[in-house]
Amino acid sequence: MGTREVPGRQTVRPRAGPMLQDSGVPHADDDAAARTSRRTTASSTATPARTATTLDPAAMRAHYRAEGLSEQDLEPGPFAQFSLWFAQAEASGLHEPNAMIVSTADERGRPSSRTVLLKRYDEQGFVFFTNYGSRKGRELEANPYVSLLFPWHGIARQVIISGTAERTGRDETAAYFRTRPHGSQLGAWASEQSSRVASREELDRMYAQLAARYPEGEDVPAPAQWGGYRVRPESVEFWQGRENRLHDRLRFTRTEDDGWEVERLCP
Ligand SMILES: Cc1cc2nc3c(=O)[nH]c(=O)nc-3n(C[C@H](O)[C@H](O)[C@H](O)COP(=O)(O)O)c2cc1C
């Protein structure tokens, strides 16, 4: 499988239509009517601004699709399986299916999580871009173990990747940076990610200074502190929601000779 760029919705196309139909993947909005009626009920007795306490999360219970994920359905390796599900997530209409939760831990094992965007993946790993001086960047320098989670709730699926992160090469970072919109390039310079800033005005002032220095159309170099991490998976779990909470969980784990073995986990 070749490298896939994931800059936006247009570039990733699902596989052929019949396969998607056969797979029974629902559209992300299939439950929209049910959700709307629940919201209407919740807000009918109070003004919208003060309804927070009337919505009981324990009463929210989605019913998941019956079609399962079997060992026979799986693609031969986790990258091919991810590729298939990623295309189906996109085709289902999910918003930003390349958004993933990255969890890191500091040297004392204290965890932290945040959302980032997957920008590339292939057999070498899953790539995202960030500020190396950010909290996640500092944690990854001290402790490269990382978890990536794709929360595709709208189609009752999640993918969880565990592995280690290493910085992408400078050339790869520079090549990706050049594809970013001018404003995002300036934003990468203007924001010392995760550090305290005195005010919103301060942030806007830094951006304005950079915009004056690098007007639209002028090349902006990638900041030294900004770049990619590539996560090399040790395991990849594919989770498919099913009825009665008897979900399917199939996990690929890397073997010593760089192959993969598959285990089924209890839901
Ligand atoms: C949908 C979404 C996508 C995001 N994508 C990125 C990203 O690709 N890279 C990044 O550094 N931060 C991204 N962020 C911001 C991060 O969630 C986070 O606020 C930031 O990276 C600082 O995290 P840290 O202080 O834990 O290091 C995104 C946030 C959201 C909600």
Image (cartoon, grey):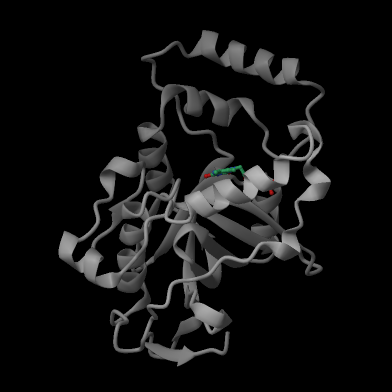
- 22 or 118, nearer to the observer: 22
Q: Is residue 32 above or below residue 65?
A: above
Q: Name the side, left or right, on which 81 lies relative to 101.
A: left
The location of residue 215, given as percent across then percent down, is 45, 10
Q: Name the side, left or right, on which 250 lies relative to 47.
A: left
Which residue corresponds to the image point at 49% horizontal and 74% vertical from the top-left? 241
Which residue corresponds to the image point at 37% horizontal and 68% vertical from the top-left? 82
Within the image, what quadrant is residue 199 found in?
Answer: top right
Q: Is residue 161 above or below residue 10?
A: below
- Judge whether residue 25 can be spotted in this image: yes
Residue with the most extreme top position: 212
Which residue corresponds to the image point at 53% horizontal and 13% vertical from the top-left? 211
The location of residue 224, given as percent across then percent down, is 55, 38
Quadrant holding the C terminus: bottom right
Which residue corresponds to the image point at 48% horizontal and 66% vertical from the top-left? 156
The location of residue 217, given as percent across then percent down, is 36, 14
Q: Is residue 208 above or below residue 173?
A: above
Quadrant holding the N terminus: bottom left
The location of residue 102, given as percent across then percent down, is 60, 58
- Number of on-image labels: 0
Quadrant location, ligand no. 1: top right
- Judge whether residue 1 can be spotted in this image: no
- 77 or 267, nearer to the observer: 267
Within the image, what quadrant is residue 86 found in?
Answer: bottom left
Within the image, what quadrant is residue 22 found in?
Answer: bottom left
